[in-house]
Image (spheres, rainbow, N blue to C red):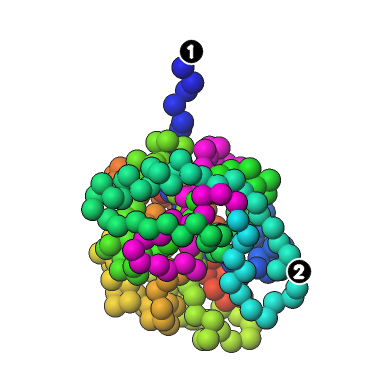
Amino acid sequence: MNAAAPERMPALYLSHGAPPLADDTLWPGQLAAWSAGLPRPKAVLMVSAHWEEAPLALGATETVPLVYDFWGFPEHYYQVRYAAPGAPELADSVRKLLRGAGMPVQDIEDRGLDHGAYVPLVEMYPDADVPVLQISLPTLDPQRLMEVGRKLAPLRDAGVLIMGSGFFTHNLAALRQGGVPSWSAEFDAWGREALDAQDVDALLDFPRKSPAGQLAHPRTEHFAPLFVAMGVADATGELGVQRSVIDGFWMGLAKRSVQFG
């Protein structure tokens, strides 16, 4: 008897949190409950705000040390380990899909998972038993990132969970002690409405179309992974099959996290 075909996986955009996410009283449980409600993935393909590299790069396909790409935190955050298996077969599939579409791909075999990748994965798959491949953001252009997502979409039918990891609002320099800044709340509300309305044009042009867009994202790398997930969903006509699984704020930043499909 043939094994059942893998269930089509959703595509995710999640707000990943800094290393102290692990100490939050609410958020780790929200991420754990989210993953518990998903089909079991054969592998995770991760796109993090914290790796920009052009042309698009594939990270390590075997387990290598994590990238502790943050400074000034207590020592125990640098002792976290997440030895997920590599995903060489997934890397081969990504190369074929992207190169077949005329998109260049490079390999950076010693590049481990950064905190945008492993911080949420520690909460979602704490046993580190799901193979993980991280790829870089090859651009911050939303249109081009949606196209990358469209080309990667067939992986969903092979049981691959495609995850874009960023932050729904991200301007550390503009945060003030206590409370949620108006720019963060306004952008979060606008983004929720734009997603619900499937207003792709507004989302693509968010610096101009949204309230406080340039304050919410003075640089767009933390919003950029959303467009990869949107492209994945768009390839199968599922942009309207989306919901915010996590919302609210953490240290004034919107932690809205979205599931497509």
Amino acid carrying mark 2 in the image:
His
At horizontal 32% and vertical 61% (from top left) the residue drawn is 145
Q: Which mark is residue 76?
A: 2
Q: Which residues are magenta?
A: 36-63
As displayed, is residue 35 above or below residue 57?
above
- Up the image or down, 43 lies above or below 149; here it is above
Q: Position of residue 201 (x, y in %)?
A: 25, 64
* Residue on which disc 1 sits: 1
Decide: few, some or many residues near mark 1? Use Cα within 10 Å; few <14, some 14-19, many ≥20.
Answer: few
Residue type at mark 1? Met
Q: x, y (%) of residue 6?
A: 46, 31
Horizontal arrangement in the rendering, residue 216 relative to residue 41 (left or right): left
Q: CA distance from mark 1 to mark 2?
A: 49 Å
* Side of 73 where 167 appears, left or right: left
On-image quarter of the C terminus? top left
Q: Position of residue 232 (x, y in %)?
A: 35, 49
